[in-house]
Image (cartoon, helix red, strand yellow):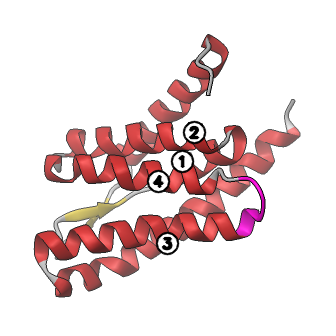
Amino acid sequence: MTLTTKKIAPLAIISALTLAISLFLKIPMPLTKGVVTVLDAGIILTALRFGKAEGAVVGGITGLLFDILSGYPQWAFFSLLIHAGQGYVAGLKGAKTLFLALSCVVMVGGYFLISWLFYGLGAALADMPGNIIQAIFGVVVGITLERSLSRVK
């Protein structure tokens, strides 16, 4: 990924919008003290529009900053890794549907493992439905936004 102003500017704008919307729309998950957000939609949009490296950058930045700004600093490093992985996998070329599904597995599986480590198996299992919904919603909205933007040249 070559860093130019033409590349940095849209990634910064998408990161800022994704973060702002995610900070505004948070659904609490009481058992793990976490939240469900629309963060994944911006990550998927970026991965589809720009590619794997850009998806990883936006995923990592927004995941990290969201947790720090939301008062979940213990999750920040893990969110950086999980959402960067999600963006990277979603942006892989080839069987787009397969890679989008795998990006959901990366996010849901990553948070499952870390929730299990932090809070135990019961809480990790209780958190899974929210993460599954968030991942699927992110893919649907990300694809919809990408298709809408591709029509506008």
Q: Are marks 2 and 4 in contact (CB under 8 Å)?
A: no
Which of pointers 2 and 4 lies earlier in the amino acid sequence?
A: 2
- Please tell me which residue is depicted at 55% across the width and 63% down the height of the picture: 103
Confirm or deny contact between disc 1 and disc 2 (CB under 8 A): no
Badge 1: few (under 14), some or many (20 or more) residues near its Cα, within 10 Å? many
Q: CA distance from mark 2 to mark 4?
A: 10 Å
Q: Is residue 94 magenta?
A: yes
Q: Earlier in the sequence, mark 4 or mark 1?
A: 1
For label 4, the SS is helix
To which residue does mark 3 refer?
105
- At a point 58% along the width and 56% down the height, the residue shown is 89
Query: Residue drawn 55% across and 33% down?
Result: 14
Considering only order in the chain, which callout, 4 or 3, is on the residue closer to the N terminus?
Answer: 4
Quickly name the residue at label 1. 43
Residue type marked 2: Ala
Q: Which residue in the protein does label 2 denote?
A: 53
Label 4, label 1: how far apart the Cα atoms are: 10 Å
Identify which amino acid the numbered label 1 is placed on: Ile
Whether residue 21 sits left or right of residue 144 in the image: it is left
The dominant secondary structure in magenta is loop
Distance in Å between CA atoms under marks 1 and 3: 14 Å
Secondary structure beneath dot 1 equals helix
Residue 66 position (above or below residue 103): above
Q: Which mark is residue 27?
A: none
Magenta range = 93-97
Q: Is residue 29 visible?
A: no
How dense is the environment of label 4, judged by Cα within 10 Å: few (below 14), some, or many (20 and up)?
many
Q: Is residue 67 above or below residue 110?
A: above
* Amino acid beneath label 3: Val
Q: Residue 145: x and y, percent?
A: 70, 48
